[in-house]
Amino acid sequence: MIKTLFFLSLGFVCCKLNAQIPVLTATTTAQAIGQTFAYSVQFVETGNVSIGVGGANQVWDYSGLKDSGAAINVSSNIISPLTTPYYATHFPSANIASTSDDNSYSYNEITANYSHVLGSVDSSGYITKYSPYRVTLQFPFTYNSSFVSDYTTTRTTTTNPNPSIKYYTTDSVFAEGYGTLLLPAGKSYSNVLRVKTITNDTLVIASAITFITKRTLIAYYSPNFKYGLMTFVTATQEVLGTTTSTTLVSYTKNTALPVTLLNFNAIQQNNQVFTNWQTTNEVNASHFIIERSTDGSSFTAIGKVNAKGGGDYSYTDNQLPAATIIYYRLQMVDKDGSYTYSKTVAVPLIIHHSPLTLYPNPVKETLFVQLTANAAETATLQITDMQGKVLQQQTQRLAIGTTSISVNTSNLAKGSYVIVVKGQIVQQKQFVKE
C-alpha cells in the first residue's frame, strides 16, 4: 500500500498565494541546436510517496523523498540532424537531434505548434522508430490542455531492417494541475505544470507473444526548463494471463536554470570580438562563462562575468586565435554548480593587414619585413624573381599587432625581387638586392 506522508497542513494550504498559470511553448520548452544539458535523474524509495492531486494553485511537497541509491547521469548535446549518420536513411523529416556520450542519437521534429519524437539509434545499433511519430507536446500547452497520440513503435537494427518488436500505443495527455513543486535539498519551483499521461501498449514479439501494458505517468514541467523536474510512474503489465505492477518515482537533480536568456550575440570589431547577451528571470544565478572554439566542437573558457540579477551583459575577446571562423557560446551557471548552455554563435573573422614595410631597401644581407594585423594567423612568406619563380619560402606566425620578420638575402644575386606574404590576405612588395 502506498502511504501518504506528504499532505500539507490545512492552515498552509489556505494561506498559499495564487500561482501564475504556466504555459509551455516551443521557445521556452523545446530544445534548440547548440545547447548542451548535463543533469542526473535520481530514483527514490516509493513506499512513502503519495501521488498527490491535480488542480489549480497546488503545492506538491516532495521535499522528504528518500533517495534509493540508483541514479542515471544524463549528458546531451543538441545538434543538427544533418551532421548525424542516420538522418538521410532513417529520419529525413527530423529538424533537431541529440547525442550523448555513448554515441546514441535521438531524432525529433519541433515546430512552433508541436514536438514530435521520430525515433532513436542506440550505441549497439538498435533503431527505434515511431510511426508516424510520437507527440510529446503540443504548443502552447497549459492548464486543462490535452491531446491524444496514436503511434506504432518498431525496433530493428542497422544490419537487419525487419522489425522483431512492434508496439501499438495510445497516449492520452492532460495538463491536470499547476502550482509549486518542492523537492529535496531545499529546491523549490514555482510556475510548474503537472501533466498526466495514460499510455496503453500492446506489444507483439515475433508475431507470437503479446504483452499488454497500462502506464500512468505524472510529470512536472516548468517553462524555464528543457526537461521534466519529476516523474511518478505506475504500470501494470499482463503477459500470458499473469499481471505484474511497478511503481517508479524519480526527480531531476541539478535542474536550476540560472537565467532566461533572451539573446546572445557576437560580432567582430577591428581586432576584437564583442559578445553581448540579455537575460531575465534570473533565479539563484551565479555567473556566466564565455567559451570559444575554432572548430565549433571543442570549447575553451576565456572569460567570466558575475550575474547581477538580469539585464544586459557583455564581454570582449581581445586575444583572437588563428582561425577563419571563431565560435562562441555562453555557459550559465547556478549557485549550486548546475549549468546550461546558450546557442553557439559563429563569427567569420575578417583580417586586416597594414601595407608591407621593407627595410633597408636596397638590402645587402638581412631584409626586415614588417606588417600589422588585427588577428593572429599563420602566413607563408616567399621571395620570387620578377617572373614569379619562388626562390625562398618560410612559414611565419603573425601575431595581433605588428610583426617584424627578418629574411636572409645573402644567397641572392644582385637585382630586383618581390617579397610575397600569403595569409588570408596576399600582399607583395618589390625590393632590390645590392
Image: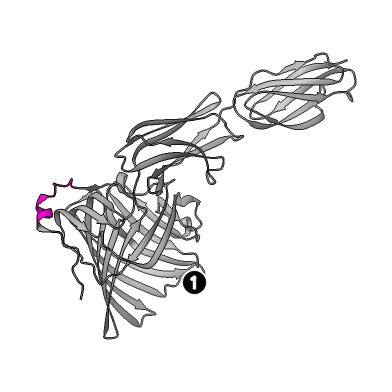
Q: Which residue is mark 1?
A: 160
Q: Name the residue rendered at 33%, 56% in the picture.
A: 116
**Amino acid type of the residue tagged 1 in the rendering:** Asn
Q: Is residue 18 magenta?
A: yes
In-front residue for pair 20/207 = 20
**Relative vertical location of residue 116 with respect to residue 240 in this rendering, above or below:** above
Q: Is residue 388 visible?
A: no
Give the left or right position of residue 142, taking residue 207 as reference.
left
Residue 59: which quarter of the image? Answer: bottom left
In-front residue for pair 283/353 = 283
Residue 131 position, x and y percent, is: 34, 63
Bounds of the magenta span? Answer: 11-21
Numbered-mark total: 1
Q: Identify the element where label 1 is drawn.
A: loop
Residue 115 position, x and y percent, is: 31, 53
Give the left or right position of residue 179, taking residue 228 as reference.
left
Residue 356 position, x and y percent, is: 70, 19
Q: Quadrant of the N terminus?
A: bottom left
Q: Is residue 122 visible?
A: yes
Q: Is residue 191 magenta?
A: no
Residue 70: which quarter of the image? Answer: bottom left
In-front residue for pair 255/308 = 308
**Relative vertical location of residue 100 with respect to residue 330 in this rendering, above or below:** below
Are there few (<14), some (14-19), or many (20+) residues within 10 Å of tag 1? Answer: few
Q: Quadrant of the C terminus?
A: top right
Residue 112 position, x and y percent, is: 30, 46
Give the left or right position of residue 325, taking residue 205 as reference.
right
Q: Name the residue rendered at 20%, 71% in the picture.
A: 3
Q: Residue furthest bottom?
A: 241
